[in-house]
Amino acid sequence: MKLNARWFVFFLCITSVNSYAQKELTGTFSLLAGQEVRLKGFNGFDTYSIASVEADQSGKFSLIYTEKDYGMGYLVSVDDKPFILILNGEDIELKGETLGFPESITILKGRQNQLFEKYATEHTRREHTLSAWDFLDRIYNSDPLFAVHDNPKGAIEAEKLRIKVEDQMFLESLDNETYVRWYLPVRKLVSSVSTIAQYRTEEIPEAITAFRAMDYTDHKLYKSGLLRETIEAHFWLIENSGRSLDSVFIEMNISINHLIANLVSDGKKFNEITDYLFKLLEKRSLFGSSEYLALKVLNETSCTIDNDLAAQLESYRAMKKGNIAPDFGFMDDFIAPGYEPGKSPRKLSDLKTKYTLVVFGASWCPQCPEELYQIARMYEKWKKYGVEVLFISLDEDKQAFRNFAGIFPFISMCDYQRWDSPVAKAWHIFATPTLFLLNNKQEILLRPNSASHMDAWVDWYLVQNNK
């Protein structure tokens, strides 16, 4: 049977409209008259604009969101103070003074948002009260004046349990099919890590287990605005759980195993999340786990790794502790203070000191000047214990290199090829400053994250051993 063309077009239009069903978000804010109001959504680590409109002279506005925006969102005006909302298939109506003063805002329509607001208010009060009971609990268990009284201790424990049960019952009463039912427990977990680490250490194993059980491929998480916070809270809690550093790395590596196993089914998210976590671990100087993550990702055959990420991670495989660093000839333009003319070293292996700190940097690198000036200040101390410093500049201008490196008391060199420098490529350099500590066999002993880190190594391994 032939379908009438007009009916076919009508059918397509209806299908298109239904696939992105529109919902309305309206508001009346007395202090927003004539101002632009923007609605934004979350997508992984990023935010995006959904809609914007200018409020009328009475502060009224109306915005539209669709099914593709389902998740968390926020309203923002000229003061850039966000008001968080659930965008999940319901019309929403708000009334207040301004978005930056949430105490003035009433949610007139939108059941999930009303539940979200109710829980956010009540949970905060419960947490404050629990903190007070925790304080009393410590007094009644540690102060001899009070520890002899069992009845108050029992009453305190009973009240703490009652508050926790009441909070959990609220969450369990929510409809499992709603976004608010998924979102609130995740938000509670993320926001509680600081309190758990400081005051409720007995809850640390349970919280870490909850983080490991999360599905990082879940679209709800990507639309929640909590992706970044979830990863950071997970690894911050392990780092601040009172363990030794070796134990911290063991626990982090277990979490990395869970994360990789979860992400291999989604190549895009695999790349995004492992890239973010790698940079986070590097930033926190947790090199034991950043190296473990790098090698784990590089050995994962189920996913294709982005070229940029692969280049960063390859540095850990090729230049990990224990490997032999590639030798190289010194560049034509080099500065060698302290060496007689004609007797200066011509390649890395010519350096006969016990240790060599190789530093990659540049005058244009924001962090490099401070790090190199610190190295220059510590150089004489290090040299007494057999440490030479070799600075390899990724500058491309001769005068800039000479002005920058000419004041340093250690060897400096540059071939003016920036990231295309053969040495930088052979050593898999992707960021500056990057530091490597070698022994006299060019074996990599350490990848210091800073001059201070290197100085601490000298104090611990060289100064202490020579007393």
Image: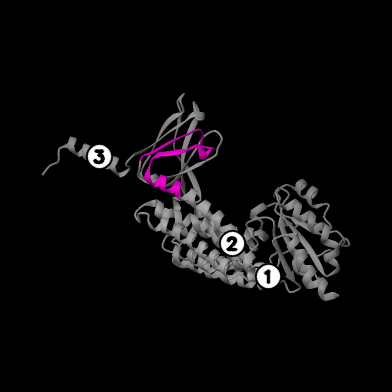
Element marked by disc 2: helix
Which comes before the other along the chain, label 3 or label 1?
3
- Quarter of the image with the N terminus is top left
Residue type at numbered disc 2: Asp
Q: Within the magenta stretch, is there residue 97? A: yes
Evaluate whether residue 6 shows in this view: yes
Q: Look at the numbered disc 3 and give the secondary structure of its residue.
A: helix
On the picture, is 326 further left or further right than 403? left
Provide residue 42's location: percent of width, then percent of height: 46, 47
Marks 2 and 1 sit apart, C-alpha to C-alpha, by 17 Å
Q: Amino acid at mark 3?
A: Ile
Q: Which mark is residue 134?
A: 2
Q: Which one is earlier in the sequence, the residue at label 3 or at label 2?
A: 3
Left or right: where 141 falls relative to 402: left
Q: Is 228 above or below relative to 82?
A: below
Looking at numbered disc 1 in the image, what kind of residue is underneath it?
A: Pro
- Give the x, y percent position of residue 71: 41, 48
- In the rendered image of this protein, does residue 270 appear above or below residue 27? below
Is the C terminus in the top left, top right, bottom left or bottom right quadrant?
Answer: bottom right
Whole-angstrom CA distance, mark 3 to mark 1, is: 75 Å
Q: Nearer the viewer, mark 2 or mark 1?
A: 1
Task: Provide the secondary structure element on which disc 1 rests.
Answer: helix
Q: Confirm whether the magenta stretch covers residue 135.
A: no
Q: Is residue 155 left or right of residue 114?
A: right
Q: Which mark is residue 14?
A: 3
The residue beneath circle 1 is 144
Question: Which region is colored magenta?
Answer: 91-118
In front here: 164 or 376?
A: 164
Pick the front one: 216 or 137: 137
The answer to whether any part of residue 315 appears in the image is no
- Image depth: mark 3 or mark 1 in front: 1
Name the outermost residue toward the top.
57
